[in-house]
Amino acid sequence: MKPLPLKHRSPREVYEVMRRSIVGQDDALKTVATAFSAHISRCIHNQKPWTLQKIKKDNLLVLGPTGTGKTESIRAAIRDLDLPFPIAVAPVNTLSNSGYKGRNIEDVLWDLAHDARRLTSENPDRFFEKNDFEYTEVDGKKIRKISSDIAENVVINLCEHGVLVLDEFDKIRFSSDNTWEAVYKKNLQYELLKLVEGTKGLGESPLTQKIDTSNILIICMGAFTDLLNPPPEPVPIGFSATKTAAPEHTGIAGIPTTSKICDFGFVEELVGRLPLRCRYNALSVRNLYKILKESEVSPVVDFENLFLNTGNQLYVSSNAMWEIARKAHAIGTGARGLRTVLGAVLYPILYEIDGAYKNHYITINKEVVNGEKPAIKPLPPSWAVVNETVNTLFNRCFFILYC
């Protein structure tokens, strides 16, 4: 079987890719980037035929409020690094240990296998040897095919070197207040333990039973809101008041200890298999502004393209971005609040503009964000021609990609 075409990526290289999209999470991004880099190095080492001692994996637990960039940082790595192994994101709150309600645990391996098939179909020469192909002639043309057994072996090999992101991880915590729920979620955690620790023979399908999860990098993500921001404890008053013990620390700022996570509602065996941990912090108004202004995934860019497709140009001023950031911060959903505020402001304007105006310049300032009508001015003749050309090219590119 052809070795995976793996190339070492330094933690700094992965970090620089992620930070183009994510703002205000430097410490967390360095941990995630190092985990990705170490996983690639481990796969390179372990697939060497002369390797006697294989490097064991270190899974990662990522904590942080919603909308802080946890999942987007993984997407940035997928999008820009062109990694030769599959990556799948699966929300664990849709899983069940029986499959009677929700998805089976083995279904997350199917997600990984689906991405592996995508990789092999997009670039077969990257993963198959020349002698793996079988050639047949149809209507005078040579067509090459891969036997199902060889294709399945390559998919399994890719899956065993992949990255599996278990999102909404905090949603499977158990509480002693509900006995039935505690039993159910404990059983689910123990089923996930087999996947996280590394095993073979999961599920009932022939494909998933062959996948060994020992080398798959598992990244567990969750908001853990009540754990990271617990309600303040009452302060004892009076002469008889005793000093309370200082909170337990790990030496890593803001990251709960293993015992705290277990008390939150997780079994020790599962938490122990997640030795790497990092925390994404809540975004400030300045961070939200920088996302609008600097990030590669800024929602402002999406709206600029929407308006460009109508034949008009959108301009969002700096003071408008600050006002949007302040309103989004008040919503409390992190970067997701930016789309909420922008949508409330720009979709009504888009409704009025589309079909009624062409080659116009729409300016969004602080006053427009607060309810006033935007300034709509015709573009100068030279800019109107440029705008028309760009709009035509945009439509043609979209048509080619769509077809």
Image (cartoon, rainbow, N blue to C red):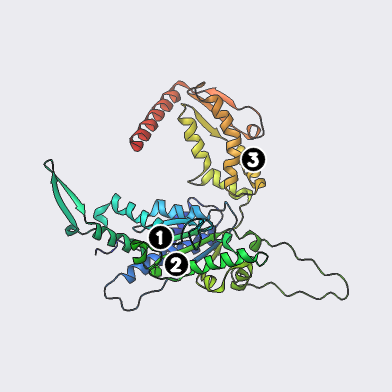
Residue under circle 2? Answer: 195
Task: Give the quarter of the image for residue 371.
Answer: top right
Q: How far, Cα to Cα, is label 2 from label 3?
A: 45 Å
Q: Is 378 or 393 nearer to us in this picture?
A: 393
The C terminus lies in quadrant: top left
Residue 323: mark: 3
Dot in front, 1 or 3:
1
Q: How far, Cα to Cα, is label 1 from label 3?
A: 44 Å
**What amino acid type is highlighted by mark number 2?**
Leu
As helix, strand or loop, the secondary structure at mark 3 comes to helix
Residue at image location 53% in from the left, 53% down from the top: 69
Q: Is residue 254 visible?
A: no
Few, some or many residues within 10 Å of mark 3 (<14, 14–19, 20+): many
As helix, strand or loop, the secondary structure at mark 1 comes to helix
Residue under circle 1? Answer: 109
Against 13, is 248 above or below?
A: below
Provide residue 118's location: percent of width, then percent of height: 33, 51
Residue at image location 18% in from the left, 57% down from the top: 130
N-term-proximal mark, 2 vs 1: 1
Dot in front, 2 or 3:
2
Residue 303: mark: none
Q: Are marks 2 and 1 in contact (CB under 8 Å)?
A: yes
**What amino acid type is highlighted by mark number 3?**
Glu
Against 392, is 6 above or below?
A: below
Q: Are marks 2 and 3 in contact (CB under 8 Å)?
A: no
